[in-house]
Image (cartoon, helix red, strand yellow):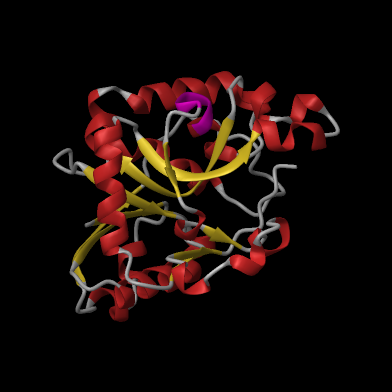
């Protein structure tokens, strides 16, 4: 199974923690691909990762794209590395067909392989580009916005659903064959100052609800316990990936 991370020096420690948690949890050897802005990053990868019994392959790529403007980076907790995943086609082997993208601030809590294989099979049958967890639904939150122009539906010209891109299952073959890199970069330039949630906005603007839906247990976030009315019904042993992100689009 193929996993991809995109981050920079600001998130090295978090990413290493994420990778170790993943390697410790899986029951089969996996391949990990990393896109990073430091040309010497490969030398900094801990031996605990490099020598892990469950690591089959680790490939590192130095991000080399220039001439792009990445909106809404200054004075935020993220860096331009969040946009690197829009360029994965320029780096990863074209022979790959299915990928699992993970943010650096995600920890794996249980063996994800059987669950991911099931969802990747569903994704392939659905003909969608990605599978992800829904972040917000228009019908549930529209009235809670103070300024209608801030809503994803207005800013991004999308319909009903907006997903969280912290964990994405990707049909990489479809990404390449249907030219999604070009679509994303065109949308990035088009949206520009309308972007609030970085490349997640770009992904949602292009995909516009046409994604396969993942359970929240694939992407369980810090604010889930606060925002969900049914929090007492959670079985925490069902959580596969815990995402240390407190994102709120309201």
Of 69 and 93, nearer the camera is 93
The quadrant in which the C terminus is found is top right
Q: Main secondary structure of the magenta part?
A: helix
Dividing the picture into quadrants, the one containing residue 22 is bottom left
Residue at the spot x=29%, y=30% of the render? Answer: 127
Membership of 207 in magenta stretch? yes
Residue at the spot x=25%, y=30% of the render? Answer: 174
Residue at the spot x=28%, y=47% of the render? Answer: 120
Of 5 and 113, nearer the camera is 113
**Span of residues in magenta:** 204-208
Of 39 and 229, nearer the camera is 229
Counting from the top left corner in percent of width and height, residue 17 is at 44, 73
Membership of 239 in magenta stretch? no
Dividing the picture into quadrants, the one containing residue 184 is top left
Counting from the top left corner in percent of width and height, residue 124 is at 25, 37
Residue 209 appears in the figure: yes
Q: Total marks drawn? A: 0
Counting from the top left corner in percent of width and height, residue 181 is at 36, 28
């Amino acid at each position: 199974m193929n996993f991809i991370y995109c981050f920079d020096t600001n998130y090295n420690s978090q990413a290493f923690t994420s990778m170790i948690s993943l390697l410790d949890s899986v029951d089969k050897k996996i391949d990990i691909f990393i896109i990073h802005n430091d040309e010497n990053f490969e030398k900094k990868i801990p031996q605990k990762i490099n020598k892990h019994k469950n690591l089959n392959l680790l490939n590192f790529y130095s991000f080399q794209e220039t001439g792009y403007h990445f909106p809404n980076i200054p004075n935020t907790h993220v860096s331009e590395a969040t946009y690197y995943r829009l360029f994965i086609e320029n780096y990863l082997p074209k022979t790959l067909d299915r990928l699992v993208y993970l943010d650096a601030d995600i920890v794996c809590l249980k063996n994800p392989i059987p669950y991911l294989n099931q969802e990747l099979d569903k994704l392939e049958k659905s003909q969608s580009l990605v599978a992800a967890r829904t972040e917000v639904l228009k019908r549930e939150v529209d009235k809670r916005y103070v300024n209608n122009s801030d809503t994803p539906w207005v800013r991004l010209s999308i319909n009903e659903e907006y997903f969280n891109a912290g964990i994405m299952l990707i049909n990489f073959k479809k990404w390449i064959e249907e030219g999604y890199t070009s679509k994303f970069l065109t949308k990035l330039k088009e949206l520009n100052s309308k972007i609030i949630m970085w490349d997640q906005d770009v992904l949602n603007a292009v995909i516009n609800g046409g994604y396969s839906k993942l359970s929240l247990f694939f992407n369980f976030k810090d604010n889930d316990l606060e925002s969900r009315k049914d929090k007492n019904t959670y079985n925490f042993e069902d959580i596969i990936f815990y995402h240390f992100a407190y994102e709120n689009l309201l």
